[in-house]
Amino acid sequence: MTPVTERDVQLLRDALGPLRDREQIAERLLEASAKHSFDPDEELDWDSAAEDGKWFWPPELISLYDTPLWRKMSQEQRQDLARHEAASLASLGIWFEIILMQLLVRHIYDKPVTSNHVRYALTEIADECRHSMMFGRMITWGGSPCYPVPRRYHNLARVLKTVSTTPGSFAATLLGEEILDWMQRLTFPDERVQTLVRGVTRIHVVEEARHVRYAREELRRQMVTAPRWERELTRVSCGEAARVFSVCFVNPQVYGAVGLDRQEAVAQVRASGHRAEVMQSGAKRLTDFFDDIGVLNGVGRRLWKSSGLLA
């Protein structure tokens, strides 16, 4: 296959239209980063106390919401579960961001180091470092334990990130960013939620918008220019990543932490129509995009359906 040059890419299109110039996109993202970047250590009041009666996560986004078990729980127990689930999601976010930083570093290893594209990637890595530290500090502030993903998935991720293609890396980036982003967009304006948690989600939403743009544009380019075998492997690895992500989304240990039977709670979450709707709604913008650019074909689509993130 003849290599595709940057000039060729400028002339190429996909189902969404012409591909944009990589350097121009990065330049705009760098300008946005200069205007809208935050230092969580300075922006947020980490010395504040948790506010009585406020949630750590919107109740409608809690995994057990509107299940028979939820209806039996006291308000105090529900809010305590929200605190632990917020810690579980923050732990998941840290795990995913550490993976994404590794994938970004690998992506730019052979790229021109003075390019806007590489400069923005390094800017994004710096953002992700701050986000990971911010999430860790939020867990500590809330008084919850950290909830690492189960060891088998932690180790499976070693394999996935090792064999990931370049388009697969950007597809995984979007998987890790867009569903949590959807939930956080519902969280930061919600006055029922703890002020500090709202501040954390606001910072993350503002900065992740740039990360999503960068990953979407690069994935479009990769799905047009990559060889067929790489596109096919991307579809499979992305589908498997979706399956792992959906399993790890909430650590079952949170149920035991608030005095619930873990097996019963997991069974009710799996049977919950509300929960399925929440997860599919959170993923819909992403799955529509993946469908448009050809990521959800073949085996990959079946894996996405098995993950519960695609209706």
Image (tube, grey):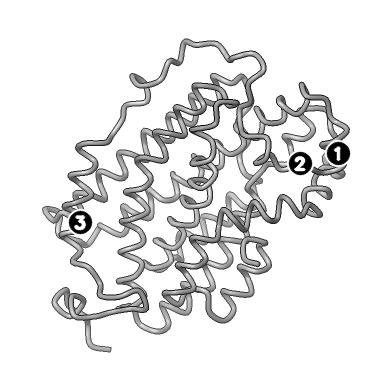
Residues 282 and 115: in front is: 282
Q: Secondary structure at mark 1?
A: helix
Compare marks 3 and 2 and give the one earlier in the sequence: 2
- Helix, strand or loop at mark 2: loop
**3 or 1: mark nearer the eye:** 1
Q: CA distance from mark 3 to mark 2?
A: 42 Å
Judge left or right: residue 28 versus residue 202.
Answer: left
> Please, what is the three-letter code of the amino acid marked with disc 1?
Leu
Residue 169: x and y in percent read 41, 61
Q: Is residue 224 left or right of residue 56?
A: left
Q: Which mark sits nearer the N-terminus, 3 or 1?
A: 1
Residue on which disc 3 sits: 117
Q: Nearer the viewer, residue 118 or 73?
A: 73
Q: Badges 1 and 2: C-beta atoms under 8 Å apart?
A: yes
The residue that appears at 44% across and 65% down in the rendered structure is 164
Which residue bears the numbered disc 1?
Answer: 69
Q: Is residue 60 left or right of residue 287?
A: right
Image quadrant where one finds the C terminus: bottom right
Label for residue 64? 2
Place residue 193 in its image quadrant.
top right
Residue 1's place in the image compared with 303, above or below, is: below
Q: Residue at x 46, y 50 (%)?
A: 177
